[in-house]
Amino acid sequence: MIKIAQLSCGTEYSSVQYEIEKAARSVGAKVVYPDVSAADVELAVERFGFRPRSAQLKLMIARAVQLADGNYDADAVFITTCFRCAEAALVRNEVRRFIQENTNLPVVTYSFTERLKASQLLTRMEALVTIVTRKELLARERQSGLTVGLDSGSSTTKAVVMLNNKIIGKSWTPSHNVVESATQVLNEALAQAGYEYKDIEAIGTTGYGRFTLGQHFSDKCKLVQEELTVNSKGAVWLADRQRGEATIIDIGGMDNKAITVRDGIPDNFTMGGVCAGASGRFLEMTSKRLKIDVTELGALADKGNWRNAKMNSYCSVFGIQDLVTTLGDGKSFEDVAAAACHSVAEQVYEQQLQEIDVRHPIIQVGGTSLISGLVTQVGEVLGEKPIVPENSQFIGAVGGALLSSGFL
Amino acid sequence: MRETRLLMICPTSRLTPDVLAREIHATGKDVKIKETCYGCLIEGEREVVREVTAFAREIDHNAVFSKRRAYKAGDPVRCRAQHGTRPGFAQLESEWEALPLIKAGLDAADNGEKTEEKPGKKKLPAIRFKEICEVK
Amino acid sequence: MKVFIDPPNSLILFDLVERFGNEPLSTMAALQERVDNLEIDMPPMNVTLDDVVKGLKYAGIEVPSGVRGRLSIWGPMIEAADAAIVVEDAPFEFGCVGCERSELMVKYLIKRSGKPALKLKYPEDEDEGKVFVQKVKEFLEGLQ
């Protein structure tokens, strides 16, 4: 049984403790609390050097020190505190860093509200267990042999063929039937690579259709894995940032992910998907109203100035209406395109990135990373231009191909 | 209605959790008893538990303290053996260490002893501190 | 007399209030009602989602959930109390009292209620222990 040490504040008074324990059980793990005596607390806080006012946060620090000193046996660490608590957010991040610097234990952090998202919690717990049970596999930095990664996402399906650490074939298509879409992109990528299905040594699947594909390609499939760990590996491989810290931002067509990693291993992520104003969908809708293809929007935006086209709303309905009105006032298409990109970047920042601690460098991936104007605006909002690696839309598939080669 | 209570023995008392538990057993009252590091847990119908608490407080006068507990005795959710200590454990531990001071207070109250409160220390006025700093 | 104690999970305050013949209003009793509620499928640890939402009576949505969850327990207890006893600088503030912001709000709610409240300094030696107990005793006798 994998033991996940919980370092937390507020869970029992936010009605989320039961959910945390349930999520841990469902992935074959158990939540434990490193033993601390009252006398340990003051000493630990003194040594740690950050003295929070809240005693529960002091206890969190003392528990972290017990883990760092090897006085308590656990396999992984889950650090979680109330969303919107500044004191806890500071401690949460510093305790995370302390654990990573002083132990080899995988860490995942989370800031919750009473409306805890059970699926996000489960993904975190699953990722923690994966990191514990597949540590050697995740340490892999080079792909070897002939392997394939299949990323069955909710809007697109991607395939990548890799041979000895090089991408030799790739393809994508809008998702329809899980197996049919994957078969199509797999065949296209294989044709581009000049190989046949029988030559493949291993397949790794990820994304929401991963289990279906794992069964369908069971003769070749060696890895069926959630996207948190797979995308992280894919992104740091593509950006050649396998060591150190980074933030991976994926603004999707419908939802967004932001993952923080250390040495390619994820330790926090946030995922949203309830607001079209904070997604690629907003850009698609803007393009339609501007009667241009979404692929042209980025270059157009880069020529404009978002400050010239004021929006009174970020909403995909009212915000776009504002943009159209601005056009009527004689503002340029370029300014409007820039304002649309800026609006999405700002919304992603305000709605999501505040839940995690943004670390540098920032690697932007996913289909929307090809819209240069959006990348520019994300950079402006975050104060640092993101790195967009080549093939950035294929991170999941690359991660799948890279990790599945570990089974050869 | 169920009532679960912690009984904690003052650290300066010679009473042990074992003796405390046995004395309560001997009353024949219908309560569950579970020994702990600091005393014991008792559980039963509210009225019976309160009678037993009053009795336990007199086994060693002013040295047995009590409070209610939300969870049942041995509830796996709260059990230390299952997953390590819950946050409230450190609280109890700290309060346990302070019990001798409270016992001294209760003994004094029994004897009708009056103790004057000492004035608290005040921060040094800045002007005085300045004078001290300026002393050659 | 019903007496709210702060820290609301304190063994010492609970014991003294009861020992001197009054009813301590404690977090533990409030939580037991929730834990023992068989109508709930999942026993809460320690409060339910409804509780956290009810906490909006005391603090707005921009306040962290853990603060609102705590206030949803303590707010009604302060309202139901006849008086309160507060230890101002307790070195023991773990568990339910682990959140400093919630604690600040509790002290404020007591003040705003206008109910008689005894503020105590945490004892550091035997003499202070004697003053502590003496004050609690006199305060509670004065309530009768």
Image (tube, coloured by chain):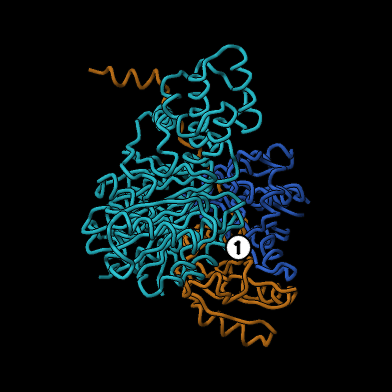
Chain colours: A cyan, B orange, C blue
Residue occupying the point 60% across, 63% down: C45
Residue B62: x %, y % from top left: 58, 66
Q: What residue type is labelled 1?
A: Met
* Residue B96, visible in the rendered structure: no
* Residue A31, visible in the rendered structure: yes
Q: Does residue C78 appear to the left or right of B89 in the view shown?
A: right
Check disc 1 and report its element: helix, strand or loop: loop
Residue C11: x %, y % from top left: 58, 60
Residue occupying the point 46% across, 51% down: A173
Residue A228: x %, y % from top left: 41, 55
Residue C15: x %, y % from top left: 62, 62
Residue hosting label 1? C45
Residue occupying the point 46% across, 64% down: A210
Q: Vertically, is A331 above or below A24?
A: above
Q: Nearer the viewer, residue A61 or B104?
A: A61
Residue occupying the point 64% across, 66% down: B70
Q: Vertically, is A22 above or below A247?
A: below
Q: Does residue B69 appear to the left or right of A364 in the view shown?
A: right
Q: Mark 1 lies on which chain?
A: C
Q: Nearer the viewer, residue A391 or A206?
A: A391
Q: Quadrant of residue A159?
A: bottom left
Q: Which of A41 and A326 is in front in this view?
A: A326
Local crowd at mark 1 within 10 Å, few (<14), some, or many (≥20)? many
Quadrant housing the N terminus of chain C: bottom right
Q: Does residue A37 appear to the left or right of A272 in the view shown?
A: left
